[in-house]
Amino acid sequence: MTAISGSACGAAAYVRTDDRATHSSSASGFAAAGPGDESWREWTRRIDDLLSARTLADDWDGQGAVAPHPALVDGAITLALSFQTDGTRPADFVIPGVNGTVVFEWHDPVEYVEVEVTAPDRAVRRAVKRETGETQVNHLVRRC
Amino acid sequence: MKPESDPLSPDEMLIRLVYRDRFTNRVPIISPGSFEPRVKGNHPDTDGISLFRQDCLNDPEDALGVIAPDKRPATGIVLVPVGLLGTLNLTAVAKPIPQVPGHVVIPELNSTDYATRPSDFTHIKLALAVAASHNIVRRPLAAPPT
């Protein structure tokens, strides 16, 4: 069970700092959410996964992967809590990258979206149109 | 079984070793993160990400020989068709290693290029993951309860 308090920033925890479009897409849908929703519970499970990622050591995959710094994982948890509060559809994957980052992934029929947390207060959002492979990139910075 | 000195043919399949958190029971099954080049740590993918030619192995699980024994249960095995690489402007180049025959790298997915412009590779990782999701040879064992 997740033992962590909600983000004080709520829905506005992260803001986009640019819109460097190599190509385009929307975010994952938003709707009202609360602790009774399946979406909320699914996010809670993802956050539990992130808490586990805090304890990873280097070479956690047996192929030399770098463990994410606990502060970066905390930033990812803040972002996940923001998504949960906003009612964003739960990510299909929330995984540590092999280079010490944390990645959220949403797989939809038309579009693939990933948000890679690259520092405790920074992330990169990439959205790929499946039909064309076009990718839109946005940089996100935590406001508080 | 082919000797690794044989040229790679377009109808071959390449093995990629995938850690268990990159598998789900949903669709898609395999995360694009399975094809992320390593740019840090002790084993950066300087020459490109590693795969193995299935035709050069008696059993795909032989590829697990490059993984520490305690991590092998947590490692799954997927296949990527060589024919797909060309459509993504990728190549596979032989780079023999002592542990396992048939080792190849994809030079275009190297640590230097990935470190400088990772967003250029997102659609490539996605295409490889989609193909891998249709070609799962071995699922990793579930994580022990914590």
Image (cartoon, coloured by chain):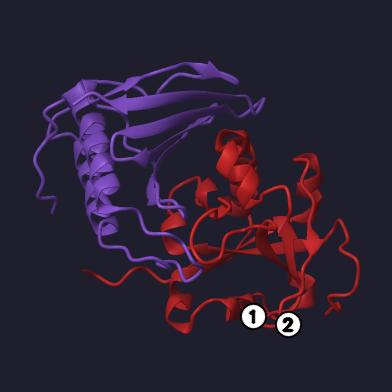
Q: Are circles 2 and 1 on residues that touch, CB within 8 Å? A: yes
Q: Is residue B31 visible?
A: no
Question: Measuring 65% from the left and 41% from the top, which residue is drawn there?
Answer: B124
Q: Say which residue label 2 marks.
A: B58
Left or right: A139 in relation to A81: right
- The amino acid type, in three-letter code, at marker 1 is Asp
Left or right: A136 in relation to B132: left
Choose between B42 and B80: the one closer to the eye. Answer: B42
Quarter of the rendering containing residue A141: top left
Residue A39, position as x, y percentages in the image: 24, 35
Q: Say which residue label 1 marks.
A: B62
- Please state the chain letter of the residue tagged with numbered disc 2 in the rendered image: B
Left or right: A83 in relation to B3: left
- Please state the chain letter of the residue tagged with numbered disc 1 in the rendered image: B
How many numbered callouts?
2
Chain coloured purple in the rendered structure: A
